[in-house]
Image (tube, rainbow, N blue to C red):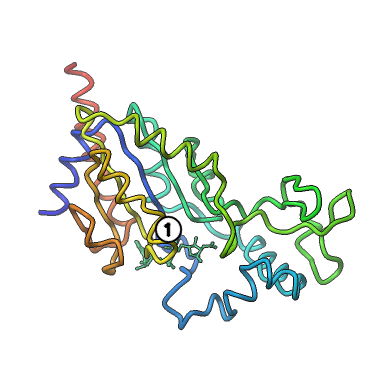
Amino acid sequence: MERQRLVEWLTETRRVLAFCGAGVSAESGIPTFRGSGGLWEGHDLEQVATREGFAADPALVWRFYAARMRRLPDVRPNPAHLVLAEMERAYPACLTVTQNVDDLHERAGSRALVKMHGSLLQTRCTGCGSVRAVVPGELNPDAALPRCDCGALLRPNVVWFGEWLDPSHLRRIDRFLRDATRAERPVLLVLGTSGAVSGGYGMLERSIAHGFRVVEVNPEETLLTGLADLSLREPVGALLGEVWPAVRDRLQSRDEQS
Ligand code: OAD
């Protein structure tokens, strides 16, 4: 029943916004953040994901992120990433906004992508602010902490707790929402996020104000569930992998008729 509604809405729409969290990469084998007593892979969030934590013990923070960076080549995009990349080609307007710092959306082929929390594959200089790609030598922080040419310490280019989001990202999302028209029957997909960080940044409320239908896909009920028009309690990779071929076929026959 819910699946059928999802297929209908995805067939009718011409504008899709996907708001993704850690659950989207769960079926690729990357653990989610919450649900382990406030610990993040055995660490206190304050220690490894704040400026204060980095100032207190940069080696600990670097060891933590370097371990996650080193694991990326061992994981693969799952059907959720692949379907989102296909959606980008299937709809006139499609944007993926992810809180994930892994590179699985990019590897699946997503280009219209906002990485709200930054990227594990980049560093940023704590002195001059320059951003660049991680190089393999930086993945062994026990030998030496990564430094910029200007001499200052490099840090992972991810957003930590208490830090601001990039305003250009927020502007891009706002533009996408503002451009929506009723005739497009716009849809917001809320995929694998708990909404625990800033209530999902008000993404659902703002989308609803712009006329989007809201679909949540998450095996668990979340803080955001009450705002969704439709909730599917299923793993997102399995669900999208099964539902998308029917949607794609219908979209193709619609295009052929028009
Ligand atoms: P969370 O770990 O808070 O939530 C993950 C969500 O994914 C939960 O609601 C799970 O029920 C759901 N989930 C698990 N497996 C799933 C699956 N196969 N399919 C669909 N859903 C599944 O992660 P986020 O909401 O992403 O921030 O958390 C947001 C931010 O909190 C992260 O980006 C990070 C973290 O602290 C920073 O690093 C700043």
Quarter, ligand 1: bottom left
**Percent from the top left, x then y, of residue 226?**
22, 62
Q: For this view, does 100 lie left or right of residue 73?
A: left
**Residue positioned 57% across, 46% down in the render:** 166
Q: Is residue 236 above or below residue 161?
A: above
Quadrant in which the C terminus appears: top left
Q: Is disc 1 surrounded by few (<14), some (14 to 19) or many (20+) residues within 10 Å?
A: many
Total marks placed:
1
Q: Is residue 51 above or below residue 17?
A: below
Extreme residue toward the top, this view: 258
**Percent from the top left, x then y, of residue 92?**
34, 26
Q: For this view, does 171 lie left or right of residue 150?
A: left
**Percent from the top left, x then y, of residue 56?**
75, 75
Q: Is residue 132 above or below residue 221?
A: above
Quadrant in which the N terminus appears: bottom left
Q: Is residue 126 above or below residue 221?
A: above
**Badge 1 is on which residue?**
21
Query: Is label 1 within 8 A of ligand 1 (CB to nearest ligand atom)?
Result: yes
Q: For this view, does 49 lie left or right of residue 39?
A: right
**Residue positioned 72% across, 71% down in the render:** 63
**Residue positioned 30% across, 33% down in the render:** 15
Which of 240 and 127 lies nearest the eye of the viewer? Answer: 127
> For the residue marked with disc 1, what is the amino acid?
Gly
Extreme residue toward the left, this view: 1
Local secondary structure at mark 1: loop
**Residue positioned 31% across, 51% down in the render:** 204
Extreme residue toward the bottom, this view: 37
